Image (spheres, rainbow, N blue to C red):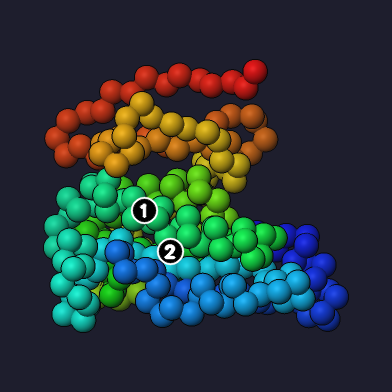
């Protein structure tokens, strides 16, 4: 999307093209900022510099791939990408919300006109995890993240990565395997085709910390007035039974 009008006006006043300034950081599960400068940078913005910021960007991966596991503290072991069922855990999936809320709060406090961007993400940092990042399990994590972050106010999500050798398991297209396409590619294409930009209210009658069903709602893409409902079942071997109760404002 183009930068908001306030940022575009500030850019014009400063004699530069809009969309040129972005503050970026990365978050690690449990620990937080990998390089703790982002909060200080945002807090240092003032009335003159804040309007020049067009985007506030952050990186987040819920799991850690094998090649990074000997480089991180032992307390991150629950987030090692050693089991595909980890992406079915509400605890793992909810980690993105913790850090997204922090970024949105910083944006609201210091640069409220700027858009929030999840500038790099996948299911496992460090190139992805074979049989997770390139398998159907990745669809669950990816679609849930798209719905979850949109509901929290994120404007854009960038997937790492579109096309790379198969050694990078999080690639949507594996260029050394005759352009093999992974399941998450089709989820991304379906999302872009069906889901619009406007987020609608969706809630479940269960605890988000333990609930094995996830729900997100949007205006459908196009001008037909339809809604797109995203339902995710985290149960491994049983169906989820959902009754949709429409909510209308009084």
- Please tell me whether residue 245 is drawn above or below residue 208 in the rendered image: above
> In the image, what residue occupies the spot 47% across and 74% down?
25
Find disc 1 in the rendering and name its residue: 142
Which one is in front, 50 or 92?
50
> In the image, what residue occupies the spot 67% across and 35% down?
223
Please tell me the numbered disc located at residue 116.
none
Disc 2 residue crowd, few under 14, some 14–19, many 20+, Cα 10 Å: some
Which one is in front, 25 or 87?
25
- Please tell me whether residue 232 is drawn above or below residue 186 in the rendered image: above
Query: Helix, strand, or loop for circle 1?
Result: helix
Q: Are marks 1 and 2 in contact (CB under 8 Å)?
A: yes
Give the image quarter of residue 28.
bottom left
> In the image, what residue occupies the spot 49% across and 35% down?
217
Mark 1 vs 2, N-terminal side: 1
Residue 199 x, y percent position in the rendering:
56, 40
Please tell me the numbered disc located at residue 159.
2
Work out how far the residue at label 1 is from the one at label 2, CA to CA, in angstroms.
9 Å
Residue 38 x, y percent position in the rendering:
51, 75
Query: Helix, strand, or loop for circle 2?
Result: strand
Q: Is residue 7 left or right of residue 180?
A: right
Residue that protrudes farthest toward the right in the picture? 13
State which quarter of the image contains the N terminus: bottom right
Give the image quarter of residue 64.
bottom left
> In the image, what residue occupies the spot 25% across and 39% down?
210
Residue 246 x, y percent position in the rendering:
51, 20
Give the image quarter of residue 81.
bottom left
Q: In this view of the protein, can residue 136 be seen by the observer? A: no
Disc 1 residue crowd, few under 14, some 14–19, many 20+, Cα 10 Å: many
Q: Is residue 42 left or right of residue 239?
A: right
- Please tell me whether residue 207 is drawn above or below residue 113 in the rendered image: above
């Amino acid at each position: 999307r183009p930068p908001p009008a306030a940022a575009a006006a500030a850019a014009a006043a400063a004699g530069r093209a809009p969309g040129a300034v972005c503050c970026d950081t990365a978050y690690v599960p449990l620990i937080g900022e990998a390089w703790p400068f982002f909060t200080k940078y945002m807090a240092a913005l003032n009335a003159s510099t804040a309007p020049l910021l067009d985007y506030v960007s952050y990186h987040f991966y819920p799991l850690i791939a094998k090649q990074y596991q000997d480089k991180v503290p032992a307390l991150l072991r629950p987030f090692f990408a050693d089991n595909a069922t980890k992406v079915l855990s509400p605890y793992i999936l909810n980690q993105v919300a913790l850090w997204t809320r922090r970024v949105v709060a910083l944006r609201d406090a210091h640069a409220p006109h700027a858009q929030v961007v999840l500038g790099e993400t996948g299911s496992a940092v460090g190139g992805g995890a074979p049989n997770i990042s390139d398998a159907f399990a990745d669809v669950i994590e990816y679609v849930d993240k798209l719905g979850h972050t949109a509901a929290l106010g994120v404007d854009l999500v960038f997937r790492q990565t579109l096309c790379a050798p198969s050694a990078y398991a999080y690639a949507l297209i594996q260029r050394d395997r005759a352009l093999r396409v992974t399941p998450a590619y089709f989820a991304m294409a379906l999302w872009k085709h069906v889901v619009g930009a406007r987020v609608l209210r969706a809630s479940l009658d269960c605890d988000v910390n333990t609930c094995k069903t996830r729900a997100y709602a949007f205006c459908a893409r196009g001008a037909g007035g339809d809604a797109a409902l995203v339902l995710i079942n985290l149960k491994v071997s049983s169906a989820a039974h959902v009754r949709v109760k429409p909510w209308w404002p009084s």
